[in-house]
Amino acid sequence: MSISHELRPSDSPYVETITHGWTLSNGSSMRPAESNWHMVFVKEHGRTHSLVVGPLTSVGVASWGVGAEILWVKFKLGVFMPHLPVRGLLDLEQNLPEAAGKSFWLKSAATEIPDFENADTFISKLARDEILVFDPVVDALLNDQLPSVPARTMRHHFLRATGMTQSRIRQMKQAQQAKALLQQGVSILDTVHEVGYFDQPHLTRAFKQFIGHTPAQILRSSQPE
């Protein structure tokens, strides 16, 4: 394994997970589509690079070099930074400028780089300063609730907070649900029926776009050797 990592949930209502990892060798792999955006801090060669990584709308290849220590903060859908619109970050990484000491610039202020232990405190400060905000309309829509606002307003809220349409995110989550079933050993045809695809080719097309492996490959990887 060329990456070692530990993952934990967060106490913050803004964050889905916090991951701390190390790259043990050079490597690359297929990475799936990702509807959430991240803040990522990469320490290598004595310097730390701070990045905002936008949602990834389709599969791609992730590559890394040896000897890096990485902190990933994965934000919940509906959380965004108004000064960095998510729609402008789709499929992109944006470097945040370095400041003096162990800091970086965020919205014209020097901000201390977090670590795995104090990441929740870091996020709480960003929320207090309203650098991070949460849109309850998006949360309601994702939980199949219908806010009492016009459909056009709902679409605006969703695009502003996530950078994508609700339909696109549902397609991505549907593929992730199907992958989880296959990893549990559920057959391909039963997965098609359970998740709501039209047929097996429909499932395969979704996996090609969002997962990066075929359903058969996922199913085989779940079988004991």
Image: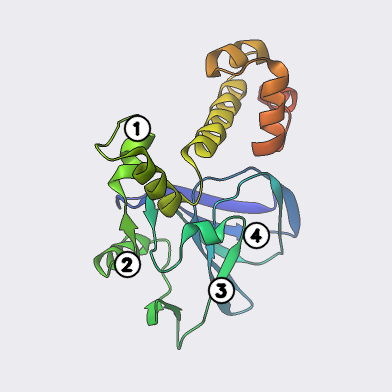
Residue 106 in the image: x percent, y percent? 42, 76
Task: Read off the residue under disc 2.
Answer: 126
Task: Read off the residue under disc 1.
Answer: 143
- Residue 23 numbered mark, or none: 4
Of labels 3 and 1, the one closer to you: 1
Q: Residue at x 40, y 49 (%)?
A: 156
Q: Earlier in the sequence, mark 3 or mark 4?
A: 4
- The amino acid beneath tag 3 is His
Q: Earlier in the sequence, mark 3 or mark 2?
A: 3
Task: Read off the residue under disc 3.
Answer: 49
Residue 5 in the image: x percent, y percent? 55, 52
Measure the C-alpha gap from mark 3 to mark 2. 18 Å
Measure the C-alpha gap from mark 3 to mark 4. 15 Å
- The amino acid beneath tag 4 is Thr
Measure the C-alpha gap from mark 4 to mark 1. 36 Å
Of labels 3 and 4, the one closer to you: 3
- The amino acid beneath tag 2 is Leu
Q: Are marks 2 and 4 in contact (CB under 8 Å)?
A: no
* Residue placed most toward the observer, 192 or 219: 192
Q: Are marks 3 and 1 in contact (CB under 8 Å)?
A: no
